[in-house]
Image: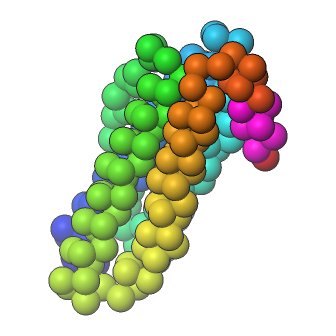
Amino acid sequence: MDNKVSSLLNDQVTKEFDSAYVYLAMAAYFESKGLSGMASWMQVQYGEEMKHGMKFFGYLNARGIKVSLGALPKPVADFGSVREVFEKSLAHEKLITASINKIYETAMEVNDHATTTFLQWFISEQVEEEKTAKDILVKLDQINDSSMGLIFLDKELGSRK
Ligand code: OFO
């Protein structure tokens, strides 16, 4: 495999585990605020990100590349509002989308068809990830600081499996 492609894929393993860590910190924040549905939603998201990290890990192994894990930065633990959490989540997903697009473009340049095919799933997944965060932000706009609305949204998000 081309060195640039393998290095970007390797970094993506750490970025996905970093995403997991970011969402786990958000789960802890929601727990501390008594929003257990949102906390549970964030824990499900944490699990998804761990799976994403393992997909990259498995792909590199399958291509005979040894994975080198990077250090995880300390995640943001405190937020000014529920809305700020989901704004940060959307901003984070946009960074991940850009990162995956960069790997895709680099793999295209060197005709690494296996990697571009592997990345297709992630490209579609990122559309979903960004849409999910945007949809929750729209709901928060509709709620407009109503505590009853927040209770309902907490319950709705808590049903995510
Ligand atoms: Fe792995 O999709 Fe979110 O970060």
Q: Residue at x 30, y 57 (%)?
A: 99
Residue 88 position in % (x across, y down): 41, 33
Q: Residue at x 40, y 21 (%)?
A: 76
Residue 61 position in % (x across, y down): 46, 67
Residue 150 position in % (x across, y down): 68, 24
In the picture provided, is 150 more to the left or to the right than 85?
A: right
In the picture provided, is 115 more to the left or to the right than 124?
A: left
Would you say residue 36 is visible in this rendering? no
Q: Tell me which segment is drawn in magenta.
A: 153-160
In the picture provided, is 30 more to the left or to the right than 106?
A: right
* The one of 109 and 60 positioned closer to us in this rendering: 109
The colour scheme used to paint the residues is rainbow
| Total count of labels | 0
* The one of 89 and 109 positioned closer to us in this rendering: 89
Quadrant in which residue 29 is drawn: top right
Quarter of the image with the N terminus in it: bottom left
Above or below, 92 relative to 141: below
Q: Residue at x 38, y 42 (%)?
A: 92
* The one of 107 and 89 positioned closer to us in this rendering: 89
In the picture provided, is 91 more to the left or to the right than 49?
A: left
Quadrant in which residue 75 is drawn: top left
Residue 30 position in % (x across, y down): 62, 19
Quick check: is 155 in the magenta stretch? yes
Above or below, 28 relative to 131: above
Q: Residue at x 77, y 37 (%)?
A: 156
Would you say residue 149 is visible in this rendering? yes
Q: Main secondary structure of the magenta part?
A: helix
Quick check: is 5 in the magenta stretch? no
